[in-house]
């Protein structure tokens, strides 16, 4: 019984990601790739490498995510299972240039 409870807890806490993480770079206050495609109705993981000297915040009101990534660092961004659609995001500290879109299909 104890083993069952531990296994069940792990399954509830650690979502399964169907595909490999999506690698995203932030350089010169621009996301590459700026358009990220993920499978609809499945959780996904983004790994954001901030190649700039300064920190920036991955921000998306539609995804309900805010994540500060220091300069020359990386951050993991977990996406919940998304309904089909388009979800804009930006680098909040450089919103004029750091723009992107997650497309769930």
Image (tube, rainbow, N blue to C red):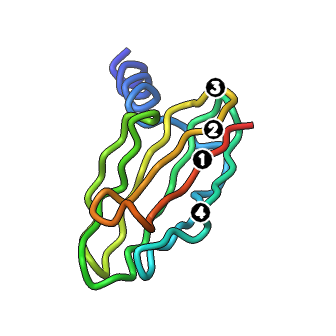
Element marked by disc 3: loop
Query: Which residue occupies the foreground of this view, 16 or 54?
Result: 54
Quadrant location, the C terminus: top right
The one nearer the camera, 76 or 94, is 94
The residue identified by callout 1 is 102
Tell me how far mark 4 sits from mark 2, CA to CA. Answer: 12 Å
- Dot 3 or dot 4: first in sequence order is 4
Q: Which mark is residue 86?
A: 2
User: Is 75 situated above or below 82?
Assistant: below
Task: Name the residue carrying label 4.
Answer: 34
Secondary structure beneath label 4 = loop
Of the two numbered discs 1 and 4 on the same chain, state the one appearing first in sequence. Answer: 4
In the image, taking residue 62 as reference, residue 43 lies left or right, namely right
Mark 2 Cα shell of 10 Å, populated few (<14), some (14-19), many (≥20): some
**Percent of width and height locating residue 66:** 30, 46
The CA span between labels 3 and 1 is 11 Å
**Residue found 36% across the figure and 41% down from its top:** 65
Residue farthest front in this picture: 96
Q: Are marks 2 and 1 in contact (CB under 8 Å)?
A: yes
The residue at the far top in this view is 1
Could you give the CA–CA distance between mark 2 and mark 1, rounded to whole angstroms?
A: 6 Å
Distance between the Cα atoms at labels 3 and 4?
20 Å
- Where is residue 1? Give x, y as percent: 38, 14
């Amino acid at each position: 019984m104890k083993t069952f409870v531990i296994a069940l807890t792990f399954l509830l806490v650690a979502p399964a990601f169907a595909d490999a993480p999506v690698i995203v770079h932030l350089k010169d206050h621009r996301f590459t790739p700026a358009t990220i495609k993920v499978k609809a109705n499945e959780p996904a993981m983004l790994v954001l490498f901030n190649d700039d000297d300064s920190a920036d915040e991955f921000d998306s009101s539609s995804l309900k995510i805010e994540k500060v990534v220091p300069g020359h660092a990386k951050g993991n961004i977990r996406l919940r299972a998304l309904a089909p659609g388009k979800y804009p995001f930006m680098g909040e500290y450089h919103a004029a240039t750091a723009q992107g879109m997650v497309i769930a299909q």
